[in-house]
């Protein structure tokens, strides 16, 4: 006997009442679901973030620049208007960057999570990954530096116009520019990623003979290095193996002869080469400009060294570290290890004395240095005035003044009545001045 067919009804049958309830719940929850997204607009304004919305903002934007500040911090107050100026420009880039700020003094848990130990601390989050920013803080320069952070690792240039636009406009003048003519993108990609924060990298696919003349290279493949600020160019023709390319890049990150200043010294931090320092009287006068041309030629032939110059008039405190003062015959050349020691060639004080051929004298100095005819010395500490002008020196001097004032106040609190000259009547009546017991034995009796 055949079994009867059993049929079942689905347990879920959306009745009108259930649908009404479901849509009501979705309507009530939708603001909560989308609020974290809708509160962030890339409209050129500086966003205010805290514990409740920080992660949502980092997730929403591919690139977001965050200022961790404290309301009482003076540097933070100076930075704020610069960020306000930069924000709309950064929002309009091809790769837009949002700008935000966090009161790290108030939201300390959030600050601790992101290792904030000073104000302001600036970080750019690229696809959620933070990188600390140490670049300039003026709006125009800040825009250029941040544009570099988010640009492609290697820009592909496909015409003469694209090449010129990249070197004259897009890349700006704050970083050296490397262009691989006739090179594949893969040839320089790994090194471009490694040195992205220090230089622009590109490859040119199509270009005319006019470009070859303009960029001063004779054949391909070639890797050109351009320093817009210093109007310098050089070309590398291989071998195009990673080791040799990296050596060329490292040597070309700096100009042939670096003007030494507090800012430019930061660029030497990761460079292990020794520095040939030429100390001039005044780096802006005509004689110094002639010497710089000679130094450039010497630098081209000695790429294992960094060449730099400083004027005693421009930065006397730095020059004094190498035993230079107003009586020293200048120019003077030394070879500095970048730390606490330097080498002075025997009788080098008169190497560039203005009486002979400057080029010959510089080459003689380099020859003597290479042959080891040097005296090793340690740099001198800064002068007292130089130290006082430094931030640390100012702080210590102020602390010393405060300490002296505290001591004076404490002594005045315990000070006894001053010794007074008594009249004969007072002496006769035994009214001698009061002395501290420890001082009684030190008063001379007539």
Image: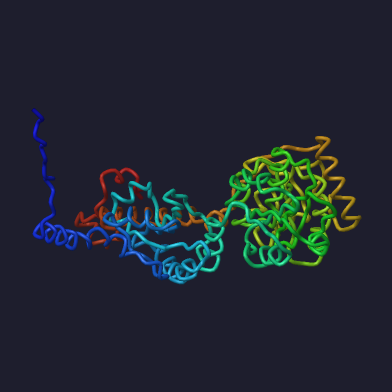
Rendering coords of residue 318 (x, y %) = 64, 53
User: Seen in the image, is 390 located left or right of residue 425?
Assistant: right
Q: Is residue 161 left or right of residue 216?
A: left
Residue 126 image position (x, y, % from top left):
46, 52
Q: Residue shown at 29%/43% (left/top)?
A: 438
Which residue is found at the position 22% from the left and 61% from the top? 30
Q: Quadrant of residue 429?
A: bottom left
Left of 177 or right of it: where is 353?
right
- Residue ID at (44%, 49%): 130
Quarter of the image for residue 406 reads: bottom left
Depth check: give the residue in front, 290 or 67. Answer: 67
Identify the residue at horizontal 68%, vertical 56% (top origin): 177
Q: What is the number of callouts on the image? A: 0
| Residue 5 sits above or below residue 85 on the image | above
Q: Quadrant of the N terminus?
A: top left
Q: Position of residue 49 (x, y in %)?
A: 32, 60
Front-lying residue, 201 or 351? 201
């Amino acid at each position: 006997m055949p079994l009867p067919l059993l049929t079942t009804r689905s347990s879920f049958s959306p009745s009108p009442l259930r649908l009404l309830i479901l849509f009501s719940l979705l309507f009530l929850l939708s603001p909560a679901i989308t609020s974290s997204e809708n509160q962030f607009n890339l409209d050129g304004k500086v966003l205010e973030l805290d514990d409740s919305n920080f992660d949502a903002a980092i997730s929403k934007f591919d690139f977001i620049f965050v200022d961790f500040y404290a309301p009482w911090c003076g540097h933070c107050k100076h930075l704020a208007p610069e960020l306000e100026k930069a924000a709309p420009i950064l929002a309009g880039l091809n790769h837009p960057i949002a700008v935000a700020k966090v009161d790290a003094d108030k939201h300390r848990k959030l600050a601790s999570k992101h290792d904030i130990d000073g104000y302001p601390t600036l970080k750019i989050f690229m696809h959620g990954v933070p990188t600390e920013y140490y670049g300039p803080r003026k709006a125009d320069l800040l825009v250029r530096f941040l544009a570099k952070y988010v640009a492609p690792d290697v820009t592909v240039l496909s015409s003469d116009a694209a090449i010129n636009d990249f070197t004259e406009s897009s890349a700006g003048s704050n970083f050296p520019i490397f262009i691989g003519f006739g090179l594949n993108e893969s040839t320089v990609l790994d090194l471009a990623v490694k040195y992205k924060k220090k230089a622009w990298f590109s490859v040119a696919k199509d270009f005319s003979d006019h470009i070859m003349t303009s960029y001063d290279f004779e054949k391909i493949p070639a890797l050109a290095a351009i320093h817009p600020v210093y109007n310098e160019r050089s070309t590398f023709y291989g071998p195009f193996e990673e080791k040799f390319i990296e050596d060329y890049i490292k040597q070309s990150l700096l100009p042939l002869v670096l003007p030494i200043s507090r800012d430019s010294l930061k660029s030497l931090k990761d460079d292990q080469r020794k520095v040939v320092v030429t100390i001039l009287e005044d780096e802006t006068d005509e004689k110094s400009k002639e010497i710089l041309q000679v130094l450039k030629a010497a630098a081209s032939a000695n790429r294992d060294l960094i060449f730099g110059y400083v004027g005693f008039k421009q930065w006397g405190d730095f020059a004094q570290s190498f035993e230079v003062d107003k009586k020293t015959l200048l120019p003077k050349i030394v070879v500095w290890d970048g730390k606490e020691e330097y080498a002075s060639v025997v009788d080098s004080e008169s190497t560039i004395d203005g009486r002979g051929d400057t080029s010959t004298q510089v080459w003689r100095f380099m020859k003597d240095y290479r042959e080891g005819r040097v005296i090793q010395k340690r740099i001198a500490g800064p002068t007292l005035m130089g130290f006082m002008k430094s931030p640390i020196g100012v702080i210590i001097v102020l602390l010393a003044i405060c300490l002296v004032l505290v001591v004076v106040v404490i002594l005045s609190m315990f000070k006894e009545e001053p010794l007074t000259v008594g009249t004969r009547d007072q002496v006769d009546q035994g009214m001698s001045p009061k002395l501290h017991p420890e001082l009684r034995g030190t008063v001379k009796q007539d």
